[in-house]
Image (tube, rainbow, N blue to C red):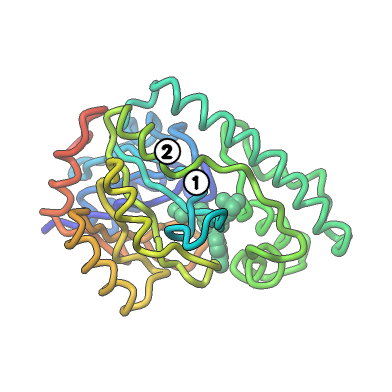
Amino acid sequence: MTRIDLHTHSTVSDGTETPEELVATAAAAGITTLALTDHDTTGGWARAAAALPAGVRLVRGAEFSCVSPTGRPETPGDRATVSVHLLGYLFDPEHPAIVAEQRRIVDERIERLRAMARNVAADYPQLDADRVFDLVPEGTTPGRPHLGQALMRAGVVSSVNEAFASILRNGSKYYVPKRDTPVEQAVAMIVEAGGVAVFAHPLARRRGRVIETSVLADLAALGLGGVEVDHPDHSPEDRALLRGVAAEIGLVGTGSSDFHGTNKSTPIAAETTDPAAFEELVAKASGVEVLGG
Ligand code: AMP
Ligand code: FE
Ligand code: FE
Ligand code: ZN
């Protein structure tokens, strides 16, 4: 029996389980291959590796914060963009371009979360904007879920999900954008570092505007290796659409839970990747090895 979950978060970004707890949770859930994909950092790799239980293989990865065109421009000057996530697996974590870009994005995220906290505190004085970073230990990639936790503690909302619905969502009056990496550049960076790049949840429509599938074809030409097909935020229709597109343009289709501990309601291994698809992905990578087993 194999059970492969290729997208999970720990406390090194916006998950609620430490890397050590996460690999134990994976083992308890019968996962045989787990990818750790914290936002914009490889900071949890060594901890997860050191705590890896027997019988679990570890794919070291990260989820890169990117900006993408929404589609092919229809008119000259059409530059509509959308914030997207790109999963990188098995890349060299010391590749200078990746190290520099992850550092830049984390710094950007710190300033952005501080600005959002101030915006929210202006309307919700129960929130102490200066204390939001108490919930973000050194070395952690800060994200909106941390602000959601702070809003829970302040008694403004009863869950992080509720915080997103009312206050933190894209387009809310409190929202502050961050300068993400152009997705074409991120694909190139991951490939150059020996990794394989997989477009994360491209049709997660409840988060806002999404890309047209032509973007996947354009990125495939630049070295994109796969696309997340089975994801909790994808409808059955969109999964079918993506499966077709992936087959047509030669991308590996994956399935993953995007587990965030109690910051989201999806359990680990809620979605999984087919073993043959996983082997195809691994064959495209040459940066670092899959660990354990
Ligand atoms: P950020 O990276 O700071 O822009 O925040 C985006 C993150 O918030 C995503 O990676 C998810 O982990 C999380 N998120 C998005 N929507 C929700 C939601 N409805 N409930 C809980 N967490 C969410
Ligand atoms: Fe997240
Ligand atoms: Fe994501
Ligand atoms: Zn994720």
Label 1 neighbour load within 10 Å: few <14, some 14-19, many 20+: many
Q: Position of residue 36 (x, y in %)?
A: 37, 44
Left or right: 274 in relation to 24: left
**Going by the picture, which residue comes out furthest to the front?**
76
Q: Position of residue 206 (x, y in %)?
A: 52, 72
Q: For mark 1, what is the residue?
A: 66
Q: For the residue marked with disc 2, what is the amino acid? A: Ala
Please determine whether, in this image, residue 40 is positioned above or below residue 263: above
Q: Position of residue 174 (x, y in %)?
A: 76, 60
Q: In which quadrant is the C terminus drawn?
A: top left
Q: Quadrant of residue 245?
A: bottom left
Please determine whether, in this image, residue 218 is positioned above or below residue 124: above
Mark 1 and mark 2 residues within 8 Å of each other at the beta carbon: yes
| Nearest to the observer: residue 202 or residue 271 | 202
Which label belongs to residue 186? 2
**Which residue is at a point 26% across and 51% down the rendered structure image?**
226
Q: For the residue marked with disc 1, what is the amino acid? A: Cys
Q: Position of residue 194 (x, y in %)?
A: 27, 29
